Image (tube, rainbow, N blue to C red):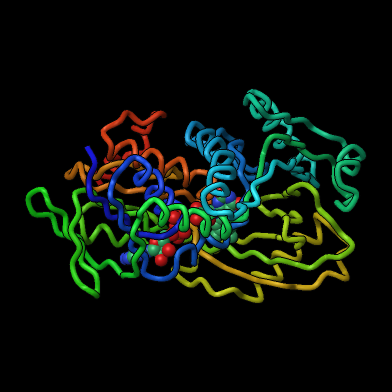
Amino acid sequence: MQSNVCVVGGGIVGLSSAYFLAKTGHSVTVIERDSIGSHASGFAYGSLSPLGEAGQAEDILPELEIARMGMDIHTQFSRELFESTGIKTDHRFRPALDLTFTASEATKAKKQVEWRTDEKGYRVEWLSSEEALQVNPHISKEILGAVYTEGVADVEPYKLLLALTQACELLGVDIVHGDVSGVIRKGTTITITTQSGLRTCDNLVLAMGPWMGKTAEWLGIEVPITPLKGQIVRLNAPNVTVNCSVGWQGNYACTKPDGLLWAGTTEENVGFNDIPTINGRDQILEALNKMIPNLDDATLVQHTACLRPLPVDGKIIIGSVPNDQNIFLATGTGRKGILLGPAMGKIISQLISDQQPEVEITSFSPARFASL
Ligand SMILES: Cc1cc2nc3c(=O)[nH]c(=O)nc-3n(C[C@H](O)[C@H](O)[C@H](O)COP(=O)(O)OP(=O)(O)OC[C@H]3O[C@@H](n4cnc5c(N)ncnc54)[C@H](O)[C@@H]3O)c2cc1C
């Protein structure tokens, strides 16, 4: 049944939900208090890999099926959004090269190769340092070896958000400015309060990223999400092209289609402070220099910081709230929201359209926090 849906949050999760809901025939309003894509969704690195990051995840992602779905939707988006809006999302397949400098890093990375090779559609192998240097001659000669992965991709998050926004508008989605401050449930109607007045809807999607904790006050349920700050720099490095995503211990760098060398990142527990810092910049540059030395003539072009929505138990949150089948939460994507966001949007649309989600989502339900 087609319904009137309000989506709170104009990040990748909210906009993807709006896009798929509108395509299914629902009447959709997105409410965003700042600008569309002005937080993590617009300023992420944009790496797309369902295999986890070498040096980061030791185990298979709990959201692997959703991540696979995300990979497919990104490929679909790159065509579909370009056709409808003329905006390129800069989606491309490019390899990843995860470096190791110590024996323990190498042992861990080789273990990851074992389970990563099981994933269909990817080529994953351990390379000696000589072989890795053939993939990219700019990486450090100090490495012991590297994990090479083909089949992973990236996208320019801000362009993706821009394309999604325009595609949503072409589908009739109303995108409005507003700071949502509460939710009132009366009978079959859901009312949300904003500074500029009240709005009613049949279904409500809360996709407020790291600010989802607020919903505890509105709905009387726990949504244990905390902000995890991350910073990124973009450099003009005229003599160095990094044609793959080079990674080490959660740090990464790659020359993007804009010609700039993007590098990150930090993980900082500093509440809702999202100001770029000199310490953050220096930490990134130090790791970058270890991975890719000889960047002496590189100059800093842009330095950004934003907040990841970090779930307390490491798993995304998606589904209706325990006491209300028409109010949906979608968040908790941590370092993977650009990859997972479009798939989460499609799942939200399937749930609201009374369709069976195409992947199993029970373990990601907000109901798991009911006893907190
Ligand atoms: C440095 C960095 C690098 C990253 N790199 C990658 C990567 O390479 N690959 C990847 O997959 N992921 C990456 N991520 C993670 C990804 O960016 C996030 O997981 C994702 O963007 C979260 O999307 P979201 O829509 O949930 O939240 P957000 O993008 O934060 O959007 C939430 C929106 O809700 C709005 N909002 C909040 N409260 C209200 C309210 N009360 N009323 C109205 N609006 C409200 C906010 O203004 C915001 O615009 C990275 C993150 C960081 C910080």
Q: Is residue 49 visible?
A: yes
Residue at image position (73%, 55%) is 257
Q: Is residue 101 above or below residue 260?
A: above
Q: Quadrant of the N terminus?
A: top left
Along the viewing direction, whichever of 197 and 269 lies nearer the viewer? 197
In the rendered view, tell whether residue 211 sits above or below residue 130.
Answer: below
Residue at 83% in and 69% down:
298
Residue 203 in percent (x, y) is at 23, 48
Q: Is residue 309 visible?
A: no
Q: Residue furthest left?
A: 187
The location of residue 349, given as percent across then percent down, is 34, 41
| Residue nearer the viewer, 370 or 80 | 80
Residue drawn where x is 57% and y is 68% of the image: 305
- For image coordinates 83% across by 57% down, the residue present is 292
362 left or right of 240 in image: left
Q: Quadrant of residue 159?
A: bottom right
Q: Nearer the viewer, residue 53 or 108?
A: 53
Q: How many marks?
A: 0
* Residue 336 position within the rendered picture, expressed as x and y whole percent measured from the top left: 53, 47
User: From the viewer's perspective, is 115 left or right of 237?
Assistant: left
Rendered image quadrant of residue 185: bottom left
Whether 299 is drawn above or below 116: the answer is: below
- Residue 33's image quarter? bottom left
